[in-house]
Image: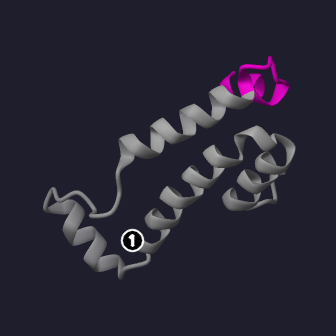
């Protein structure tokens, strides 16, 4: 699991917890937009950040909410994975 990329880990969760697959898809979608946006040239990203601009296309609250829903979905069943992530 440690050697897996973030997307591989999320796909594994979707396989292990089929009822969480929609939540995983949402997290992957938001994460994909993040990766696309941060693939810009480093100096452009630094300039935007130092000017106090939010990086367009990144909605941090939406991402946090999606991850939280995913964790709750797999954790509501008393799952050990959820406990390990939270603790």
71 versus 44 height, above or below? above
Image location of residue 51, percent across then percent down: 13, 62
Total residue callouts: 1
- Element under disc 1: helix
34 horizontally vs 17: left or right: left
Task: Magenta stretch: give its range.
Answer: 75-87
Is residue 86 inside the magenta stretch?
yes
Instruction: Tell me what residue is drawn at x 35 percent, y 57 percent.
Output: 58
Image location of residue 7, percent across then percent down: 68, 60
Image location of residue 11, percent across then percent down: 76, 56
Task: State the residue lying farthest toward the left.
Answer: 51
37 versus 78 height, above or below? below
Instruction: Tell me what residue is drawn at x 71 percent, y 52 percent.
Output: 10
17 versus 87 height, above or below? below
| Scheme of colours in the image | one colour
Image location of residue 24, percent across then percent down: 65, 49
Closer to the camera in the image, 85 or 26: 26
Determine the main secondary structure of the stretch shown in magenta: helix
Is residue 71 inside the magenta stretch?
no
Q: Quadrant of the C terminus?
A: top right
Closer to the camera in the image, 62 or 39: 62
Q: Which residue is mark 1?
A: 37
Instruction: Tell me what residue is drawn at x 78 percent, y 46 percent.
Output: 13
Crowding around mark 1 (Cα neighbors within 10 Å: few <14, some 14 to 19, many 20+) is some
15 horizontally vs 87: left or right: right
């Amino acid at each position: 699991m440690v050697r897996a990329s973030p997307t591989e880990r999320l796909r594994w969760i979707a396989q292990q917890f089929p009822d969480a697959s929609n939540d995983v898809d949402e997290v992957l979608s938001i994460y994909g937009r993040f990766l696309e946006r941060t693939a810009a040239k480093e100096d452009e990203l630094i300039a935007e950040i130092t000017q106090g601009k939010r990086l367009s296309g990144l909605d941090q609250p939406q991402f946090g909410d999606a991850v939280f829903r995913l964790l709750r979905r797999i954790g509501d069943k008393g799952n050990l994975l959820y406990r390990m992530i939270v603790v």
